[in-house]
Image: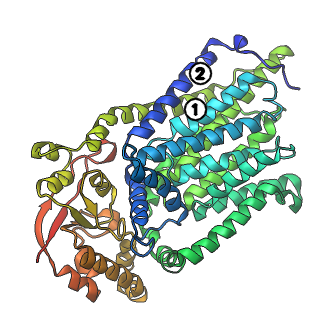
Amino acid sequence: MVTPSKSINETPWYEKLIFVAAPFLIGLSAWLHIVLPAESDKGWLLYAARMWLQGQKLYVDIVESNPPLIMWIYSVPVWISLHVSWVTDYGALACIGLVCSMLSILAGTRLIRLHPAFAGNAVRQAEFTLLQGLIFIFYTTQLYFFDRDHIFLVLTFPYMLRFMPSLAAEKLPVRLRVLVGCMAAVGFCIKPHTIIVFAALQLFALLREKTFASLLNLENYIIVATGILYLLCTLYFMPEYIWTVVPMAVATYSDFANFGSGYAYLPPIFISMGLVFADFRPWYVTPYRKDVYYFAGLCLAFLIYALANNGWGYTYNPLYCMVLFTAGWMLWEYDWLKREHKARQLPMSRISFGIRGCILVFLMQGAFMLMYLFFMSHAASSLRTPCQNNPECWRQEGPFIGYTQEHHIHSFGTLSLDFTRWVMLLRLPDVRWDARFNHLWMVPKLVHRGESYVTSHYWILDYVGKSLADNLTHNKPDIVFVDSSPGFMGLVRRFDYAVFLSRVAEFRSAWSHYRYADTIDTCGVAMYGIPSECRYDIYARVP
């Protein structure tokens, strides 16, 4: 039995507040996504896309461990910034991300109107729309906004709604189904690990319908056809990714993963899920109940997806978002139960304390990150308008920016496992990063496994050494920053990358044109305001 829909006038004041606060938070978050420069992975991907558009060959002149789809997507905002002088690449990227988020929200809202608990209930539909906006735009921090995993979640979310138990049998307009299928196809192709969630969705359909015919639908046809076409295009246009980068990543990338600290993301998730289901009563029957188990299963699928990834924070973002969405769904069910029991004059214990607490914790976490980014926007403005002929200003912006500006460096190379520092330098005028790799993610595995592993996988060391040698010989960067930080990624203290790579004759010859010039002993303050212990030796090119 579904209770009659309520109007906005019947909504309690504290729920009406949501219709004021949520649009404000979403709008403020959208503005921050646009004005704050891209850091970390997004900054590198934008740089790689720029180099590709300027003539370098992807997976040859610039090597990236991600499949090419993310490069194709990021090349769009870069192309816009190259042709419209007042538009930044990160601003255009954020705008594209906001458009995709709004498209996903509109598709999701169109689908939820067919749900028996939402049909004819304008307030519930508006709340659903705002919840999607809060998850996609407000709760997702600027660091992860429209990065690979955020793209995956945003574009596949309507597909997940399409096949929830209450909507799977509904007949939808063909245009809506094509839109949902095309969005999901791009989302599932963004990285190989997404097949885990896709397989989980097919498993849910099989368990529910108990027939393979449930998998034969227009949306799945579009996804499978797009995936095959994508693979064929990659094989034809960028075979180096399949035959060189993938084997190298399979052999070495695991030791660059962040599994240890990545597990720190799990306790908040388990606590949140405990709060979500603290008042759960399996014997209740509601119009939301079949979908509760479906979304709980999706949370499990995203947990497996996160654990199968590399352990870095952005891989857990879809899981956090799905837990928050499940919390909102459970809150609607609890609200329905209270109204139903009150109408029937049935006793009911106090419920939904845990679920409201869970949502409050998520919103507080998102608000804290929003305030942090808001105050960081002043620092971002200084990056957009760098210091002009002011050495003291350069030093205040960081030792790397200070050194580069003070010594009039126009190009630099790197031998490092970190790349977040170099992305900031790219915002300086007339400074070029001559990088074949964003970082040497293949080195830790070669070092950890010892000489026998290096010998059996010498082709990797040979490939990296020759690639870097070609870069140093043809591009001739003014300086090279060599990371000698203590024990990063389990490497020995003061690990010497140059000595290790000099096993390759071509690199040894190219490196002979560089001499030690200086050392940066401290990197100051790193991301999120945490002091960073590091040491970089600077080698300058000699005639």
Q: What percent of the width, then of the height, locates residue 347?
A: 80, 17
Label 2: few (<14), some (14–19) or many (≥20) C-alpha neighbours in 10 Å = some
Q: Which residue is depicted at the point 35% across and 85% down?
A: 451
- Residue 123 got which mark? none
Q: Is the residue 94 above or below the residue 308 in the image?
A: above
The residue singled out by tag 2 in the image is 18
Please tell me whether mark 1 sits on a helix, a strand or a loop: helix
Q: Earlier in the sequence, mark 1 or mark 2?
A: 2
Residue 279 at least partly seen: no
Residue placed most toward the observer, 299 or 65: 65
Q: Which residue is depicted at the point 80% across and 30% down?
A: 117
Q: Which residue is depicted at the point 65% across and 42% down?
A: 104
- 100 lies left or right of 311: right
The residue singled out by tag 1 in the image is 358
Q: What percent of the width, then of the height, locates residue 15?
A: 63, 18
Please tell me whether mark 2 sits on a helix, a strand or a loop: helix
Q: Is the residue 412 above or below the residue 298 in the image?
A: below
Which quadrant holds the N terminus? Answer: top right
| Amino acid marked by disc 2 | Ile
Which quadrant holds the C terminus? Answer: bottom left
Mark count:
2
> Viewer-nearest of labels 1 and 2?
2
The quadrant where residue 49 appears: bottom left
How far apart are the alpha carbons under marks 1 and 2?
Answer: 16 Å
